[in-house]
Image: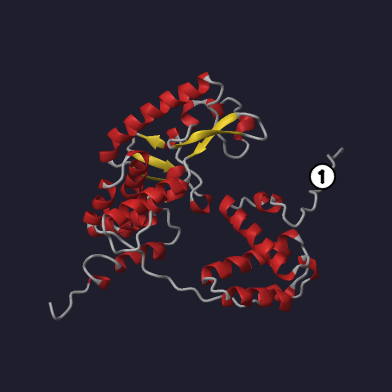
Amino acid sequence: MNREPTVARRPPRLFEREELRFRHYSPSTEKSYVAWIRRLVRFHGQHPRELAGGEIKQFLDRLLADGVSASSHLQAMCAIRFLYKCVLEEPAPWIDGLVRPRTHRSLPVVLSKAEVHAVLERMQGTPKLMASLLYGAGLRLIECARLRVKDIDFASSQIVIRQGKGRKDRATLLPANLRQPLTAHLKQRQALHSADLAMGAGSVALPGALARKLPNASQSWPWQWVFPATRHYRDPATGELRRHHLHQTVLQRAFHAAVRESKMTKPATCHSLRHSFATHLLEAGYDIRTIQELLGHQDVATTMIYTHVLNRGPFAVRSPID
């Protein structure tokens, strides 16, 4: 019986991202890991194959001395572990002996309903609609930016999140108060897409191998970004004139400006809207499991942290003095 010859994968270079993509790591993890390894090389001025365990520890200790947070320190350690075990494939028994930093979980910043409305009232246009989705549907910022037209199901009153944190899909609610603004926004968006097609543009990047399987999908309306960028870019691989989704910093800047204008003292960020979504649902009496599903948390313990920030005080206990 003839067997097809097996083609061995070419060993990746030090900074090649093939190994990360082969294991389906997220783009943000890929970017962070590569940055940490480059920082390691610059610190010692040597190839990692020439480094010993003590030199790796010296680099990690320097990070702590420079004031790097425990979570960033842990991320650097994970990047180094991935480099030696998966990329270089060299025996490094000292890796398992590295001490993981102790991290602490801080309480999330939660806005009251009045504070949320005060911030949203000071926003306008697309950033206001995106911020309303963060609060009304519990979306993460990147999940909102990556929404495609087909992900909004008006008939079922739900929004489908594709490839969210941990590369998992989930469904969350479509707020009734946002149906009309979203409908109007998509009508404008479709007119923009038609204009793009008329000028030879109108393409978007597609996930995985979908571009090869469905060659015309990149220009179809369902696959377009709900919140597109204002400018085009030329894709270097295909030569197509495309639009990326709106960059996260557009919403972040608009949100921070609204927070300043509202004279709020809380260190609120866009993610505070997601925290507020979960907390306000708990206050309304919804069960923790339902909220866990809407947020896409793998462990209910992650969702339970919102029980500590309800407006009834810690653990919903009434003080004896009251």
User: What residue is rendered at 57% in x and 39% in y?
Assistant: 207
Badge 1: few (under 14), some or many (20 or more) residues near its Cα, within 10 Å? few
Q: How many marks?
A: 1
- Amino acid at pointer 1: Val
Asked if residue 101 can be seen in this view, the reply is yes
Q: Quadrant of residue 214?
A: top right
Q: Position of residue 132 (x, y in %)?
A: 32, 45
- Describe the colour scheme in one phrase: secondary structure
Q: Quadrant of residue 114?
A: bottom left
User: Left or right: 209 with respect to 173?
Assistant: right
Direction top: furthest residue: 198
Direction right: furthest residue: 2
Q: Position of residue 203 (x, y in %)?
A: 55, 29
User: What residue is rendered at 37% in x and 43% in y?
Assistant: 127
Q: Does residue 217 lie above or below 79 as drawn? A: above
Q: Quadrant of the N terminus?
A: top right
Direction bottom: furthest residue: 320
**Which residue is identified by label 1?**
7
Q: Quadrant of the C terminus?
A: bottom left
Q: Does residue 161 lie above or below 226 as drawn? A: below
* SS of the residue under disc 1: loop
Direction left: furthest residue: 322
Q: Quadrant of residue 153?
A: top left
User: What residue is rendered at 75% in x and 71% in y?
Assistant: 92
User: Left or right: 206 with respect to 1?
Assistant: left
Q: Position of residue 76 (x, y in %)?
A: 61, 66
User: What residue is rendered at 52% in x and 22% in y?
Assistant: 197
Residue in front for this viewpoint, 108 or 231:
231
Asked if residue 170 can be seen in this view, the reply is no
User: Left or right: 225 with respect to 59?
Assistant: left
